[in-house]
Image (cartoon, helix red, strand yellow):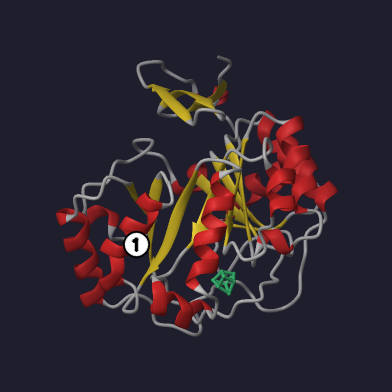
Amino acid sequence: MEYKVRLSDAGVHLFDRDSGLNVLLDEVEVLPGQVSPAPRYVSIALSNACELQCSYCYAPKHAAMLDIDRVVAWAVELDEAGCLGVGFGGGEPTAHPRFAQLCGRIAASTSMAVTFTTHGHRLTPRLADALRGSVHFARLSVDGVAATYERLRNRPFTAVRAAAALLASVAPFGINVVVNGDTVGELDDLAAFATDVGACELLLLPEQPTAATPGISDADAQHLVRWIRGTATPVRLAIAQSGLEGSVPAVEAIPGERPLDAHLHVDATAILRPHAYATTGMPIEGSILEAVHALKGAV
Ligand code: SF4
């Protein structure tokens, strides 16, 4: 097995994108001048386009789309600088007309994991065929089950179940759920759905405040914490950084890792941001590593 190597303040990190195996050799000292300059993971909003209209959506609504030659050049640069994975989102990444080609080019020209998050309603057998072999993990957004899902997403729940089956033929996948007052009471059903469709992870995303929504309430956040502590679901649970992870038995992936070393986000207008909800960032003029350096100096 050939591992990709990332050097960080925490030690030597080995990663295999095909199995998803991560090994941290924390007993190996890495000198400051040897630390990999790229963040461990970069999320990229390929476009702002999405045909759904979720009230809690954080994606900007103005039209914007990234050029794939530019994204491939950034990926090659990030790969050489120790980044372990890129994750495409949006908007809806499968709405990008050259999405499958982009994933294929990055899988072929780097050793990073290629991942994406989708609502699933644009997946077709043809797109699944084009993505197979070029994607290492996928995430399917399922906010609530049955009537709740249909009210929030205005799409049939049977359609997202069919999308899960198609996604399972492409790569290992997880279910993402935005946790709020609509969905917090359906976590048992969502965990059962994830198990039924063969997902290997349920990622809990406490709703974040946006211009249109105040975010998860304190009462719903406490409900979520109680559910996590009490559930016996066999599916692996993960929780987004939200302030709640300190209240549940969550594992810190890389001890002591600084947020800007863990993850950065590129929006659909090529602005590099500390995360998808950040209001400020650094334009990527040419080199993405120059923008990483400038952002770290400015924050
Ligand atoms: S599916 Fe995702 S990108 Fe589309 S509107 Fe809903 S939250 Fe936004």
Report which quarter residue 245 is drawn in.
bottom left
Q: Who's the residue at 67% across and 33% down the image?
A: 79
Is 251 drawn above or below residue 231 in the view shown? Answer: above
Q: Who's the residue at 56% across and 58% down the image?
A: 163
Q: What amino acid type is highlighted by mark number 1?
A: Leu
Q: Residues within 10 Å of mark 1 (few under 14, many from 20)?
A: many
Q: Position of residue 112 (x, y in %)?
A: 63, 33
- Residue 241 visible at all: no
Report which quarter residue 266 is drawn in.
bottom right
Q: Quadrant of the N terminus?
A: top right
Of residues 75 and 190, the one drawn nearer to the viewer in this rendering: 190
* Dot 1: element: helix
Q: Which residue is mark 1?
A: 190
Is 232 drawn above or below residue 151 in the view shown? Answer: above
Q: Position of residue 193 (x, y in %)?
A: 37, 58
Is 185 drawn above or below residue 228 in the view shown? Answer: below
